[in-house]
Image (cartoon, rainbow, N blue to C red):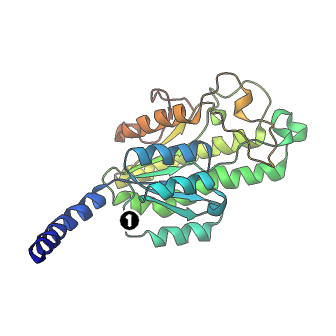
Amino acid sequence: MRLIALVAASLLAAIAPLTTALAAAKPTVLITGANRGIGLELVRQYSARDWKIIATARDPAGATELQALAKVDPDITIEKLDVTDHAAVDALATKYKDQPIDVLLSNAAKTPRYMSAMKGAATIDYEEARNSFEINALGPAKLIADFLPHVQKSDQKKIAVISSKAGSFAESPKMSMMYEYRTSKAALNMIVYTLSYETAKKGVTIAAISPGSVDTKPVEGELGFGTNFKQPGVIPPAESVAGIIRVIDGLTPAQNGQFLDYKDGRVIPW
């Protein structure tokens, strides 16, 4: 028995470094807005690919589906984060200062679920517009500024920002609608474009990605105005995310600063 115990201990001692090395070799993705919709599905699909995942949510305790995923996958770490809280972004970046992040995935966003979304300029909700700009444009800018050094340390060196064709002058709806949302996404696209001149110097590739019209139903207490699931041609989150990940996998330095479609990676005109 003593011999068996010694052999077992020796085997464990020999395997431990290999297990640690394999864990360290796993690529890491940080995903914001991971509690539902596209963000939750990103966590689900990266988990299936055996990545290490840092998943952020404003209310982790209320993110029951995300919590369920983390219970079965020890490589999922949930962090509390509101991207408009710049001190919190700073703190999270400091917490993970020694962690290389292969893919920084800025997904957290505010969708147009308010009364003025489908109405004209006379009903623009300026408070919603400011809020949308803080979340959809400045939030990703701050996230990227803080976590760019983490991405530089990684093997893949990629930043993906979930944008929207609603922010494209060329391909957004040809009608008066969603002033608050569309302007915030246009600002986000410009931030990505401008950042690309900085990331290029640091060996990092950044791209904005349109996820398509995704069936992201409102949570309890939100208005349904402007939600994608009422529009024709909507797709489930799983289909959108499979395309997003495929585009991220294929990102090259030649695509730095571009706005890409989730379907095939085609360049969407600004």
Residue at left 42%, top 40%? Answer: 248
The residue at the far bottom in this view is 2
Q: Let me know if residue 248 appears in the view.
A: yes
Q: Nearer the viewer, residue 148 or 170?
A: 148
Work out which residue is located at the far front of the displayed protein and give it. 1
Report the quarter where the C terminus lies: top right
Q: Callout 1, which amino acid?
A: Gln
Q: Residue at x 40, y 37 (%)?
A: 255
Q: Residues within 10 Å of mark 1 (few under 14, many from 20)?
A: some
Residue under label 1, please give it.
Answer: 99
Q: Secondary structure at mark 1?
A: loop
Q: Position of residue 73 (x, y in %)?
A: 44, 55
> Where's residue 165, x and y in %?
62, 32
Left or right of residue 49, residue 88 in this image: right
Pick whichever, 186 or 155, lies toward us: 155
**Relative to 249, does residue 27 appear above or below in the rendering?**
below
Measuring from the top left, give residue 261's x and y in whole percent.
51, 30
The N terminus - image quarter: bottom left
Residue 93, position in %: x, y? 49, 67
